[in-house]
Image (spheres, grey):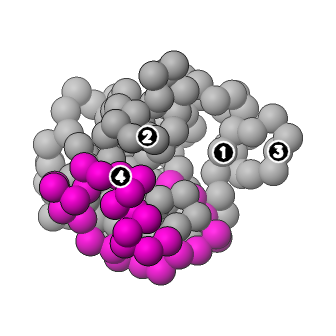
Amino acid sequence: MSREGIERDFPTLVNLGYTITSPETIEYNCIAWAAGDIEKCWWPDPQHLYFWPSETPRKESIEAFIEAFQIMGYALCPNTEYEEGVEKIAIYVDSNGKPTHAAKQLNSGSWTSKLGSLEDIKHTLDGLGGSGYGSIAVVMKRPKRV
């Protein structure tokens, strides 16, 4: 997608700023990116077209997404502030509470997202709010892996 397309779909990014950090690819999606997997797409679809941890419900619910990240060592976190030695993710939901997106925090304190099958970007959390991704429902954290 061109910069124009990103800015059309996520107009708040124009004011808050963002940087494209990778080319487009269909190899992985935002949930996989937040989980640290760049080899497959993650989604709890009932048709089993995408990867989803077998220990978690294959449902498009915030509870299922929380469980998927808990398996990877994440726990619910009350804030988005950067903490040394900690990895954080944020899960977005639409107005019906259905998960739509996940972002992960960088060592700089900024956030990074994979825009579906499009580019990865560095951004602020508020930059993706509204629009198609909705709002942040939960933040989770785990000790940083070495």
User: Which residue, given by chain and number where applicable, does mark 2 sit on?
Assistant: 133
**Viewed as shown, does residue 111 lie left or right of 33?**
left
What amino acid does circle 3 point to?
His
Which element type, helix, strand or loop, lies under badge 1? loop
Query: Between marks 2 and 4, how big is the CA–CA gap?
Result: 9 Å
- The numbered mark at residue 48 is 3
Q: Residue at x 35, y 76 (%)?
A: 21
- Whole-percent x, y for residue 68 in the image: 57, 38
Q: Quadrant of the rendered structure where residue 46 is? A: top right
Indicate whether residue 141 is drawn in magenta. no
Q: What crowding class fits label 2: few (fewer than 14 Cα within 10 Å), some (14-19), or many (20 or more)?
A: many
101 up-or-down from 94: above or below: below
Q: Residue at x 64, y 29 (%)?
A: 60
Q: Nearer the viewer, mark 3 or mark 4?
A: 4
What amino acid does circle 1 point to?
Trp
User: Which residue, given by chain and number where applicable, does mark 4 sit on?
Assistant: 10
What amino acid does circle 2 point to?
Tyr
Which element type, helix, strand or loop, lies under badge 3? loop
Q: Nearer the viewer, mark 1 or mark 4?
A: 4
Which is nearer the N-term, disc 2 or disc 3? 3
